[in-house]
Amino acid sequence: MNDQSAPVLRVTDLNVTYGTNHAVRHADLVVRRGERVAVVGESGSGKTSLAGAIAGFLDAGTVEVETLELDGSSIERTGPAGRIPVRTPGLSMIFQDAMSSLDPVWTIGSQLVAVLRATERVSKRRATADAIERLRAVGITDPDRVMGAEPHELSGGMRQRVMMAIALASKPALLIADEPTSALDASLAVGAMQLMVDLAEQEGTAVLVITHDIELCRRFTDFVVVMYQGEIVEQLPSSRLDGATHPYTRGLLECVPTLASARLDELPTLESVRARLEGTAA
């Protein structure tokens, strides 16, 4: 399947519930080959539950979905979430906390080599050489040292780079990144996002980014999906964010700090957005 317009991910009517709490409601989503799509919204809007349900990484709750296809193949997710995830070929995920995502007792080299050998049947020597090159590709200048290091011996930024190398080592059709820059400061966040999208483009991998950072979406993604109280309320090209029409999306944009808002006595908040949505005065 080489058609660039063909969907890598197709989701129709996906719902996630935790007991009586409906975290995701009737979500429809399409990500096409090579696209970079961001899902944005405040904490509790359902972003991570949506990503976890798609990837199979929910450890609680119940998933119901009409259609869930990855690269044209159907994926079964309906039913109670499994406490032990099952790997889905063609799909990789980067989590916001790289420290808890990496095995604390395995060296970085052992973890990366294991992924490479599981993906392609190559010798350990060949996989080790490939691992070193992949660490160089994510900007690690001393890959030999990092190969023998354990996760706690690396900085947060380096661990995030290692996670990118591991996630892309399996050459996935789709990479889901859940708040991949939340543990990094602003300058490192920009560099990490640039690195991730560049590497994904080289591998021909589509990217679905879960984030709250509107400006990173505008700069590094093609489309933005906006979630509010578990529902997708707007989808539009990132380049047309300023033309968003839904009041919640407008509220998110208003909350982005600017030089103009720095002169205000009080910064805009989402409380006024909720008031408008509920039909009450702010």
Image (tube, helix red, strand yellow):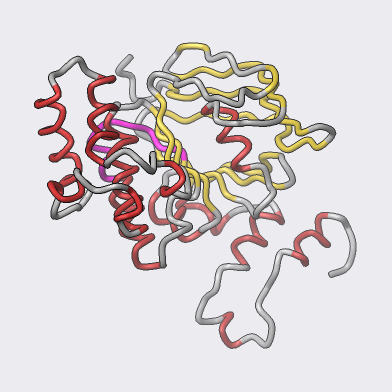
Residue stretch in magenta: 198-208
Please, is residue 104 above or below residue 122 in the view? below
The answer to whether residue 79 is left or right of residue 10 is right
Camera-side residue of 281 and 22: 22
Camera-side residue of 207 and 79: 79
Please say whether residue 74 is one of the residues in the magenta stretch.
no
Camera-side residue of 225 and 242: 225
Q: Image quadrant for the C terminus?
A: bottom right
Query: Which residue occupies the extreme front position in the image?
Result: 105
Please, is residue 273 above or below residue 96 in the view? below
Residue depicted at x 75% and y 31%: 17
Residue 189 percent across, percent down from the top left = 38, 60
Q: Quadrant of residue 122?
A: top left
Residue 35 percent across, percent down from the top left = 39, 36
Q: Is residue 269 visible?
A: yes
Residue 152 percent across, percent down from the top left = 35, 53
Query: Which residue occupies the extreme right position in the image?
Result: 280
Q: Is residue 200 visible?
A: no
Please, is residue 152 above or below residue 185 in the view? above
Residue depicted at x 43% and y 55%: 181
Q: Quadrant of residue 19?
A: top right
Residue 207 percent across, percent down from the top left = 40, 37
Residue depicted at x 62% and y 51%: 41
Q: Image quadrant for the N terminus?
A: top left
Count of numbered circles on the image: 0
Residue depicted at x 19% and y 39%: 134
